[in-house]
């Protein structure tokens, strides 16, 4: 039998003793429904809803046995549900004012320091008041927890309508965290500027150009070196194989002939790779590189147009 069926059976047995006139049937059904709903909520950990249901069936018009059982379960739920009390404190230059509290993004309401009961688990408390900074508390609760937390309210920066005390209106009492409206950063004195060390400015464009040139020429040198080594190695192997073919001619196998041809092909490919790498580096250095902005060009380039004045563009 499932847990829900057990609860329904217990409710039926408990409330069957209150059988009476027909006018009591509706009240009996409401009491049984509240008793069953309260036990279901208690089993899933929703003690807030369970307390509401047990309170509804703990008094008349429910029968005396039903009232006793609901009262007993109500006491157990109230003893187990976590509670928290927040002590509200305002800054020295901020008078007391009404505070609203929203729990888990629900509709906010006025909070005056009373005890709050919440289900176990994590909860989010958001405190707000006029002219104050919003305060958020995230707290995790376990069964039977009883916590006391302090919430400190500070004046909201830039709120000119917030009431202040006489002492707070003085410049010396102004909060250091909320600078006056229109105030700018403190000016640096000439003596302080003279003492400050001068940091060299890094020309990122020139550094990027040097890094790019280094990578291109290093890659070209590596390809040229590999091509040269491959040309010499495969070429020597091919010449050696060709001389060996002269000894076995005309009875040389196709495999030996194919090996000589392959080595000649690899030697030619290696040579071509090296030449292309050197040619590409030369074209970059004398052709494409000259059109790139130099370190001192300031991001400008010009094109000569003969009789027309030079066309200059800044980017």
Image: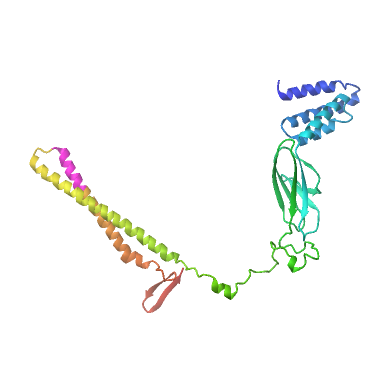
Asked if the magenta segment contains residue 5, the reply would be no
Looking at the image, the residue that sits furthest to the bottom is 307
Q: How many marks?
A: 0
Q: Quadrant of the N terminus?
A: top right
- Asked if 146 appears above or below 44 in the picture, the reply is below
Q: Nearer the viewer, residue 94 or 191?
A: 191
Is 220 placed left or right of 254 in the picture? right
Q: Nearer the viewer, residue 123 or 172?
A: 172
Q: Residue at x 35, y 67 (%)?
A: 290
Q: Position of residue 187 (x, y in %)?
A: 62, 72
Q: Nearer the viewer, residue 187 or 3?
A: 187
- Asked if 294 appears above or below 245 in the picture, the reply is below
Is 165 placed left or right of 294 in the picture? right
Q: Residue at x 14, y 47 (%)?
A: 239
Q: Position of residue 295 (x, y in %)?
A: 41, 69
Q: Position of residue 203 (x, y in %)?
A: 44, 66
Can you tell which quarter of the image residue 190 is in? bottom right
For the rendered model, the colour scheme is rainbow
Q: Position of residue 119 (x, y in %)?
A: 73, 38
- Asked if 129 appears above or below 17 in the picture, the reply is below
Whether residue 240 is visible, yes or no, is yes
Whether residue 273 is visible, yes or no, is no
The boundaries of the magenta stretch are 253-265
Magenta span: predominant SS is helix
Asked if the magenta segment contains residue 254, the reply would be yes
Can you tell which quarter of the image residue 59 is in? top right
Q: Residue at x 77, y 68 (%)?
A: 170
Q: Residue at x 23, y 52 (%)?
A: 229
């Amino acid at each position: 039998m499932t847990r829900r069926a057990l609860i329904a059976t217990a409710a039926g047995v408990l409330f069957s003793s209150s059988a009476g006139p027909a006018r009591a049937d509706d009240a009996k059904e409401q009491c049984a429904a509240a008793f069953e709903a309260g036990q279901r909520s208690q089993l899933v950990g929703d003690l807030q809803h369970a307390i509401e249901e047990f309170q509804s069936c703990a008094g008349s018009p429910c029968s005396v046995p039903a009232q006793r059982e609901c009262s007993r379960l109500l006491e157990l739920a109230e003893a187990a549900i976590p509670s928290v009390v927040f002590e509200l404190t305002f800054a020295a230059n901020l008078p007391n004012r009404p505070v609203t509290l929203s729990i888990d993004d629900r509709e906010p309401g006025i909070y005056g320091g009373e005890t709050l009961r919440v289900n176990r688990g994590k909860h989010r408390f958001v405190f707000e008041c006029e002219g104050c900074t919003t305060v958020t508390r995230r707290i995790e609760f376990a069964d039977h927890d009883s916590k006391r937390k302090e919430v400190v309210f500070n004046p909201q920066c830039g709120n000119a309508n917030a009431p202040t005390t006489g002492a707070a209106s003085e410049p010396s009492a102004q909060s250091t965290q909320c600078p006056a409206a229109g105030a700018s950063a403190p000016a640096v004195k000439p003596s302080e500027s003279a003492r400050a060390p001068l940091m060299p400015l890094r020309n990122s464009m020139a550094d990027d150009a040097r890094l790019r040139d280094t990578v291109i020429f290093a890659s070209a040198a590596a390809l040229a070196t590999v091509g040269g080594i491959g040309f010499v190695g495969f070429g020597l192997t091919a010449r050696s194989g060709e001389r060996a073919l002269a000894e076995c001619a005309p009875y040389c196998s196709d495999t030996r002939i194919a090996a000589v041809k392959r080595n000649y092909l690899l030697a030619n490919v290696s040579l071509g790779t090296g030449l292309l790498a050197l040619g590409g580096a030369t074209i970059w250095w004398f052709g494409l590189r000259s059109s790139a902005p130099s370190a001192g060009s300031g991001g400008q380039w010009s094109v000569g147009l003969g009789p027309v004045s030079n066309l200059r563009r800044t980017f």
